[in-house]
Image (spheres, helix red, strand yellow):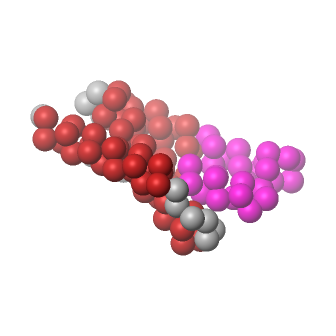
Amino acid sequence: MNIWPVLGGLLAITLEYLYRRGLTWAPPSCFIVVPIALVLSYSISRTLQGSPTMLSGLIYFSVITTVLRIGVAFLLLGDPVRPTTLVAAGALLLATSINLVWR
């Protein structure tokens, strides 16, 4: 696995966190948001290009993003983590495990 899914997950969660803190696409803050969004798009494309299949690339990106989302919601924002989010994280981890064993 390469570093691109991790970078993409970190950037996606960073944008979500900044949005929750009030940063928008308006002109004063667009100089922060637009470059992060461009690098996020590039990292997602590199994730899909570097993975054996498109599905495995999306699974890797989704696992990292979901785990980081749970961490940010619980630790930084103080939001409760819903059971459906935990079920989704478990299903993605199961899919990743099956993908690694299946090869």
Residue 45, given in percent of the width and then of the height, sits at 46, 33
On the rendered structure, is 40 left or right of 32?
left
Horizontal side of residue 55 vs 99, given as left or right: right
Q: Nearer the viewer, residue 31 or 78?
A: 78
Asked if one can make out residue 62 in the rendered structure from this viewpoint, the answer is yes
Q: In which quadrant of the rendered image does the C terminus lie?
A: top left
Report the predominant secondary structure element of the magenta stretch.
helix
The residue sitting at the right extreme is 27
Could you tell me residue 90's position as x and y percent? 34, 50
The quarter holding residue 98 reads top left
The image shows residue 101 at horizontal and vertical percentages of: 13, 41
Residue furthest to the front: 83
Part of the protein shown in magenta: 12-38
Q: Which residue occupies 79% across, 59% down?
A: 22
Q: In the picture shown, does residue 71 fall above or below 10? A: below
Q: Is residue 43 above or below residue 65?
A: above
Task: Choose between 97 and 90: the one closer to the eye.
Answer: 90
Q: Residue at x 71, y 49 (%)?
A: 33
Give the image location of residue 60, x and y in percent.
Answer: 35, 43
Q: Is residue 58 magenta?
A: no
Could you tell me which residue is drawn at 63 percent across and 49 percent down? 36
Against 75, residue 18 (above or below) is: above
Q: Is residue 65 left or right of residue 56?
A: right
Residue 65 visible in the current orientation: no
- Residue 16 magenta: yes
Residue at 79% x, 45% y is 25
Q: Nearer the viewer, residue 33 or 21?
A: 21
User: How many numbered discs, if any?
Assistant: 0
> Would residue 16 be found to the left or right of residue 94 on screen?
right
